[in-house]
């Protein structure tokens, strides 16, 4: 039995924002796949639930050429998996969406919920990070945009204040000749967060971007490593060097999913596999 | 300039636009369709869909095992898509169509999918079976010609502690073939 709360399902955004600002202990409900678990464990004291699924503008999933892809707060993960456009333009995101939790959960879980939950081992953030995703946030005081790299502040912590609601995530159009992938290591397919998850992107200009999950309190974009790789040039030798060097950029811990040593090993292996996949280089 | 409106229509989550009320409520009336029959009930908002089905409607097919979306024993179809009903509030199902394992057979006649679970020995204790059947139903309704990989993917959220996974896979695959044959007739 869940503790008692009241429930409201606004049909317009302003109503939702007003409800959120009005009372403490208000929680936003979209897919609910993380929220229900927190309620069940009494991990949060929710007195008011604001269901945002009645707000049509949050259903937006739209791509505009030369601009980019907008993913609204109500867009479920399987909608991304089913999208040919996401598969062709944002392969890493498609990979990550395809391996998130189980099929049933992907029918409910939203991408925005996945980032708001801010689990260090979440699958979607690394894929979003290599695409320079921007988070659009609203409250009664107005709208602000925060780059995803600045969005996570710690384990299960984000820059969101309790009055704020994420409207959407925006990914710039990567243009043509852009390739990316997301690879993860997990204990059990279909049920677990990743032990380590690595996203790599090779953009149209031949520049590499790397992001990684489950090796620090927040998902990380490894800018320093990217710069070094790009300066060296993407040879087989560089790939081997990078697979080694990645360990200086991460701070994994040991927990139920893995030891620190294994995480370090897998970060290295996955980075190598990603770069080999993207470049076709032999190592 | 291309503007692509991507498909985000049929999914269980974004789809449900039924309105309750903009007032905060501690009791709500929900109006939904369960296994083809309209149901109107007053509930508290903290009631899970799983408990609504089992305790209120006495539909005991969906099982509660983990209660956290890990095992799939509570799987039902919501607006045609498989969801774990332990992670859905009953109030979220307002306006929705719910299908549980009880809605699969026609009277005493088992559906093709259920028959194949019997023929392929896809159940032992049977505890996971209602959830397995509903995940499979959700798959075949949305994708009548699934590849082996798609079957594995759709069923990966359902655990079987008796571990007859191969038989379960075979049952779904065979059911897909038979349903296809039946449609072509
Ligand atoms: S009881 Fe719902 S997934 Fe296990
Ligand atoms: S048949 Fe026993 S749990 Fe699956």
Image: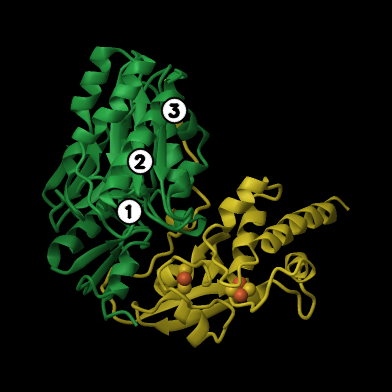
Chain colours: A green, B yellow
> Label 2 lies in what chain?
A
Q: Is residue A82 above or below residue B55?
A: above
Q: Quadrant of ligand 2?
A: bottom right
- Asked which secondary structure carries label 3, the reply is helix
- Same chain, labels 2 and 1: yes
> In the picture, residue B68 is in which quadrant?
bottom left
Depth-wise, is mark 3 or mark 1 nearer the camera? 1
Q: Give the camera-side residue of A70 and A219.
A: A219
- Asked which secondary structure carries label 2, the reply is helix
Q: Which mark is residue A89?
A: 3
Q: Which residue is mark 1?
A: A258
Residue occupying the point 32% across, 32% down: A171
Mark 3 → mark 1, Cα distance in angstroms: 32 Å
Are the two marked residues, 2 and 1, in contact with CB atoms closer than 8 angstroms?
Answer: yes
| Image position, residue A37 (x, y; %) | 33, 68
Q: Is mark 2 within 8 Å of ligand 1?
A: no
> Label 3 lies in what chain?
A
- Same chain, labels 3 and 1: yes
Mark 2 → mark 3, Cα distance in angstroms: 27 Å
Q: Residues within 10 Å of mark 3 (few under 14, many from 20)?
A: many
Q: Is residue A130 above or below residue B181?
A: above
Q: Quick one: label 3 or label 1, which is nearer the N terminus?
A: 3
Q: Which residue is mark 2?
A: A266
| Image position, residue A29 (x, y; %) | 31, 62
Q: Quick one: label 2 or label 3, which is nearer the N terminus?
A: 3
Q: Residues within 10 Å of mark 2 (few under 14, many from 20)?
A: some
Q: Is residue A147 visible?
A: no
Q: Give the camera-side residue of A201 and B94.
A: A201
């Amino acid at each position: 039995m869940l503790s008692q709360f009241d429930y409201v399902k606004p049909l317009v955004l302003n109503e939702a924002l007003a409800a959120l600002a009005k009372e403490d202990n208000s929680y936003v409900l979209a897919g609910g796949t993380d929220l229900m678990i927190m309620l069940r464990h009494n991990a949060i004291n929710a007195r008011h639930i604001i269901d945002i699924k009645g707000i049509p503008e949050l259903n937006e999933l739209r791509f505009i050429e030369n601009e980019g892809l907008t993913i609204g707060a109500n867009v479920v993960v399987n909608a991304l998996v089913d999208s040919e456009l996401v598969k062709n333009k944002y392969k890493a995101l498609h990979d990550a969406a395809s391996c998130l939790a189980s099929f049933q959960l992907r029918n409910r879980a939203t991408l925005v919920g996945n980032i708001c939950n801010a689990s260090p081992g979440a699958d979607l953030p690394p894929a979003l990070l290599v695409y320079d995703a921007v988070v659009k946030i609203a409250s009664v005081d107005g709208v602000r945009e925060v780059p995803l790299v600045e969005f996570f502040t710690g384990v299960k912590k984000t820059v969101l204040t309790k009055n704020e609601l994420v409207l959407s995530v925006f990914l710039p159009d990567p243009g043509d000749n852009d390739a990316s992938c997301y690879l993860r290591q997990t204990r059990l397919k279909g049920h677990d967060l990743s032990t380590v998850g690595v996203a790599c992107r090779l953009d149209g200009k031949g520049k590499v971007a790397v992001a990684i999950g489950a090796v620090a309190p927040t998902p990380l974009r490894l800018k320093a490593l990217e710069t070094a790789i790009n300066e060296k040039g993407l040879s087989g030798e560089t790939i081997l060097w990078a697979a080694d060097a990645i360990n200086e950029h991460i701070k994994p811990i040991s927990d139920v999913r893995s030891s620190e040593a294994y995480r370090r090993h897998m970060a290295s292996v996955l980075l190598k596999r990603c770069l080999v996949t993207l470049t076709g280089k032999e190592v | 300039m291309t503007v692509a409106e991507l498909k985000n229509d049929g999914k269980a989550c974004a789809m449900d636009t039924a309105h309750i009320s903009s007032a905060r409520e501690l009791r709500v009336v929900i109006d939904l369709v369960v296994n083809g029959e309209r149901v109107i009930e007053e509930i508290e908002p903290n009631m899970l869909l799983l408990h609504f089905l089992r305790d209120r409607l006495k539909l005991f097919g969906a099982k509660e095992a983990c209660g956290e979306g890990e095992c799939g024993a509570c799987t039902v179809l919501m607006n045609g898509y498989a969801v774990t009903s332990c992670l859905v509030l009953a109030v979220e199902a307002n306006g929705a169509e719910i299908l549980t394992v009880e809605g699969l057979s026609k009277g005493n006649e088992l559906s093709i999918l259920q028959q194949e679970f019997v023929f392929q020995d896809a159940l032992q204790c049977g505890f996971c079976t209602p959830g397995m059947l509903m995940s499979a139903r959700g798959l075949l309704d949305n994708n009548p010609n699934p590849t082996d990989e798609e079957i594995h993917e759709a069923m990966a959220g359902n655990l079987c502690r008796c571990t007859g996974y191969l038989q379960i896979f075979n049952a779904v695959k065979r059911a897909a073939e038979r349903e296809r044959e039946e449609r072509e007739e």
